[in-house]
Image: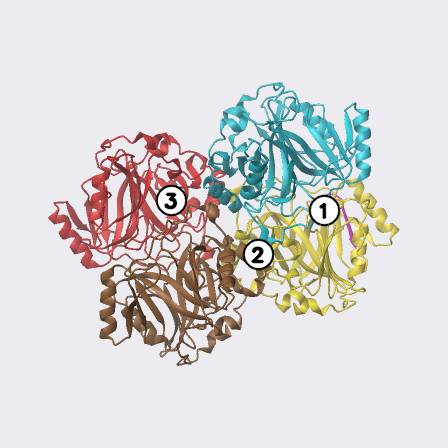
Chain colours: A red, B brown, C cyan, D yellow
Amino acid sequence: MPIPQHTFDPPFNIIRCSHAVLDVVDLAASRKFYEDMIGLHVEDSDSNAVYLRGYEEHQHHSLVLRKAKSAACNRLGFKVASEKDLDKAAEFLAANKIQHAFVEQPFQGRTLQFTDPFGYQIELYARMDKRSHLLRRYDLYKGCHPQRLDHFNVFAAEVQDTVDFYARLGFRLTEYAEEDGPNGRIAAAWMHRKGNVHDFAITNGKGPRLHHFAYWVPTAMNILHLCDVMATSGYLKNLERGPGRHGISNAFFLYVRDPDGHRCEIYTSDYNTMDHDHEPLRWSLRDPRRQTLWGAPAPRSWFEEGSPFAGQQLREPQFKADVIIAD
Amino acid sequence: MPIPQHTFDPPFNIIRCSHAVLDVVDLAASRKFYEDMIGLHVEDSDSNAVYLRGYEEHQHHSLVLRKAKSAACNRLGFKVASEKDLDKAAEFLAANKIQHAFVEQPFQGRTLQFTDPFGYQIELYARMDKRSHLLRRYDLYKGCHPQRLDHFNVFAAEVQDTVDFYARLGFRLTEYAEEDGPNGRIAAAWMHRKGNVHDFAITNGKGPRLHHFAYWVPTAMNILHLCDVMATSGYLKNLERGPGRHGISNAFFLYVRDPDGHRCEIYTSDYNTMDHDHEPLRWSLRDPRRQTLWGAPAPRSWFEEGSPFAGQQLREPQFKADVIIAD
Amino acid sequence: MPIPQHTFDPPFNIIRCSHAVLDVVDLAASRKFYEDMIGLHVEDSDSNAVYLRGYEEHQHHSLVLRKAKSAACNRLGFKVASEKDLDKAAEFLAANKIQHAFVEQPFQGRTLQFTDPFGYQIELYARMDKRSHLLRRYDLYKGCHPQRLDHFNVFAAEVQDTVDFYARLGFRLTEYAEEDGPNGRIAAAWMHRKGNVHDFAITNGKGPRLHHFAYWVPTAMNILHLCDVMATSGYLKNLERGPGRHGISNAFFLYVRDPDGHRCEIYTSDYNTMDHDHEPLRWSLRDPRRQTLWGAPAPRSWFEEGSPFAGQQLREPQFKADVIIAD
Amino acid sequence: MPIPQHTFDPPFNIIRCSHAVLDVVDLAASRKFYEDMIGLHVEDSDSNAVYLRGYEEHQHHSLVLRKAKSAACNRLGFKVASEKDLDKAAEFLAANKIQHAFVEQPFQGRTLQFTDPFGYQIELYARMDKRSHLLRRYDLYKGCHPQRLDHFNVFAAEVQDTVDFYARLGFRLTEYAEEDGPNGRIAAAWMHRKGNVHDFAITNGKGPRLHHFAYWVPTAMNILHLCDVMATSGYLKNLERGPGRHGISNAFFLYVRDPDGHRCEIYTSDYNTMDHDHEPLRWSLRDPRRQTLWGAPAPRSWFEEGSPFAGQQLREPQFKADVIIAD
């Protein structure tokens, strides 16, 4: 199957992934997890929501926890270059008959929300309230020293269509996993806007669901220390997978589950991809180094569990790429 | 003094800094330094030149060592998005009466060379020969595990004009050091195209000269190990400054001098700057944390010495910002 | 069951574990593994044996590979304080009717060999040829930067008796795993002479067999890099377990298998135990953090496989502590 | 000059250095420094004293801060093997006409205090109150993760005599710095009891004074992070020297000054020395790698300043080894 052809001239200019909005059932427990274990900085909070960010982020929040009756991914946020891009986005969505609306969101400027054709709930904005970054405020560092939100990874029931849709929006493919053979289907794709391995990864599976969102940390040592701390703070069972090295992206990773089961990846060391002639790297589904360059296999939960999007129907994937599970 | 206003709509699209071409007097000695100590991968070599790259680089070379009668910076290379951008660049240079020429360069496609109004010898290209990256070839890792060229830093006799020129080319300011007071002049500027702290930094001083070029390494541990190895391999005097933490850019750094005295920075941990509303950070020249967040002051050589550009006249800086030296 | 009472006045003074002698079927393959992957320094070699050591070791060898028809642990070496201690040891062995003999061993002074009552083949010596240590020869560092042999770990069919025997020789208990309940049996014991967690650990299982020997490395980063290198150098299957943190000893560990299946632990970060009133730490067999403070469970091979001692009969363990396997 | 001959049969058995007792003028400020910056665990405190320990220490305290009118080193504590050793020590001191007394000290058993012939105020004990160690209580880790007290370093006006005295007590020499030539005098000596590079180091200079006491941390990364935190928490001027690598001991080090100017070394990575035939390493005073394998020279304060012992007269050193200062 031909790999998707991204455009360098998209209908509007998305700069990068920006923030995740999660529905959580116990706001205090969630805040404790992200503030004390992960070490995110709480910028604002009230009885219904907590706003957090990493140490290098100037923006008001990259994670919003919202009190809700049931756990879900509420929304994924992307930042566009300018206010004009918001208008161009609205035009594009209208032309493509995708429901959308400008809404008010706390601490953000004009915000355009839509649900894409596959059920992912997205919001776009150009301006968010700014705060001084905390990168040199080492006196405040906690947890695993999270620097910035790095990417989202979703389960998609219709992988190829989803990848094609985001390629039209200018997301560029960096790596992909494919069935072998002349008719091999793409089973997973890593796509970026900001110039590293990904802003948005799309994996074959029951969808739409969020597989994980990821924070960047400075070094693997921060990740090992987080393991030690979680294991001795009552969060042993929240350590789902890792630490280890992915073949894909070359990242050193750890996957943790928050009190609602939302999956957060702690991530470091990928590579630059901003060249216009950067060529995507293909992985055979049969190459086990894709998932883990070394180390123990991923547990079943990692392949199967994810956060539904609030209010979206789940669909089975169009095909079974069972080799992934077998890894 | 107002900070330079970069454009988001430059006359042609530079993606990032790409490669340095250095004139060296003893090719074997230089190769030994960069291959065995720093750990760059030698991709090609003949009796007149050695071509090296970092482990994540797909491009054929990010450092070229050329045998010469005297040591100099021969040229700084930047990559543009496409062949069309080369033509647009030629038009821009012609319109601005800047001498330029398309030349043949080994392992590169069409290459446009020019000397900017301040004497920096630049070359632009869109396509270079590709090689498989070595990021997952850990079996080949040597030295301090250099991943990629990160940036150039030059001494400029006319800082403000140089900064303004590159702002017109789309370089965006991320940090700058300025004299205090209502008429304070900019003494140094860090500017980027690729979305991190810098591709090109411009510092007040006798110019045009290259202050240093920098390679990115994964962690500070790689830098500490390089110190240990250089100190016990006959390169103790080549350790000029560091390791330490810059206030500017928050980088963990080490400066080493190669056998010709060319300065190479080993660099890790900066931050993302791709937002269109990213605001530059101002440093007072009187703030000592700018140079070194902690640790010993820089030696005099670090402030005074640099590599001239082959064939360019040196000019004294337009003003003395002696506070820098006093740091 | 009462924990063994070590003596502070042993019949002779063992200083520490010193060296392992392994029978290997392909000397070149074994040398390649330990020299190029692990990074041990080859001090001497001939067609029948290779002698290796870690970077801080003054002694001629801490690992001897000997060409043999079948793989086995040939012998475990311990260093005593002085020549007199060798004579005292011979007296003790004679008094206890344990076969022993003084032998010539290359690069060692007077060497006393014996097989203990449980089948472990041991040798004692006071003087070995000396070499300059390589600790500051960073120019020679390779692999995971192994500093020194740290300990041996053996499977014992008669755990309690084996522990008691070595307690009589002055080995002091630091940690132990025990069945719960009033008649709980000791299933594993960690014992030291040199003042850290262990020189010799004894684990319930089919014995006598060597479970592993361990080299100390400076930091976890050296271990992560070894994983990356082995995985990309054809040694992926030799990565048996880890990296991870043991509850026991608090060590950060990796277990690798050499070409003959001998198990080598790469080990860092334990603690001091030289106080005479240091109290041993008890672990319930039911506490999963004993094996792994966090991270994936150990594979079955880790519990079941080990190196026999050349020429010794294997015996089933006196009891089944199946909980260990179930971890 | 012949190097001192230590005895393996000392008059009483000192196990290791154990604790420092410091007089401080502002107890709250000192506590804040050691608890929040260094990260020591406060075990007990009252209005006159604070008792702290490292994470692996079972003993009640390894640092005691005592409120006083002026800053001084009050006492250095060493642990002996048993109560009998205290009696043997008292006999030895009586036989050598050294004033001594058994005293009550909080949280310690029987404690024998004396002032040695050179003015160092020492206390010996065999039993101290025990606490659970915190090594696996990663939830409590703070600061630079100090594990244990490692050693003391003192200025001595009579280096050779002081070294000889402690050699009689069984302290073994591991490294020493010496003037060149046939009559070269020892200018500094590193001596141990516990089996690593040192428990007690003795340096030529105005004495008796404490140069520093040292805590062991797991890796250099903990030291780099401490620099970042201190520099951004108002303790920039308390960073006196480093981080860097000593030639001597191969330690990675940082020297910090507490609010009273007492010097604390943060230290990692040395080597084992428990072999009875371990040979001391000689450094020429003219070898600059002794002080710093690489990196910036030590500031003048590091050579000249130290903590007097409460109530002792200072004496000028017997000779000037000015090369040290010139390093």
Q: Chain of mark 2?
A: B
What distance separates the C-alpha of mark 2 from that of mark 3?
43 Å
Identity, as a three-letter code, of the amino acid under mark 1: Lys
Above or below, comparing residue B284 to residue C87 in the picture = below
Q: Residue at x 36, y 63 (%)?
A: B199
Mark 3 lies on residue: A31
Above or below, comparing residue B112 to residue A127 in the picture = below
> Residue C178, located in which quarter of the rendered image?
top right
Q: Residue furthest front?
A: B47
What distance separates the C-alpha of mark 1 from that of mark 2?
24 Å
Nearest-to-viewer mark from 1 and 2: 1
Camera-side residue: C2 or B69? B69
Nearest-to-viewer mark from 2 and 3: 2
Mark 1 lies on residue: C130
Residue D109 part of the magenta segment: yes
Nearest-to-viewer mark from 1 and 3: 1
Residue D198 part of the magenta segment: no
Mark 2 lies on residue: B228
What distance separates the C-alpha of mark 1 from that of mark 3?
58 Å
Q: Which residues are magenta?
A: D108-115
Identity, as a three-letter code, of the amino acid under mark 2: Asp
Question: Which quadrant is home to the N terminus of chain C?
Answer: top right
Image coordinates of residue A5 in percent, x first then y, are 22, 47
Mark 1, Cα crowd under 10 Å, few <14 / some 14-19 / many 20+, is some
Q: Chain of mark 3?
A: A
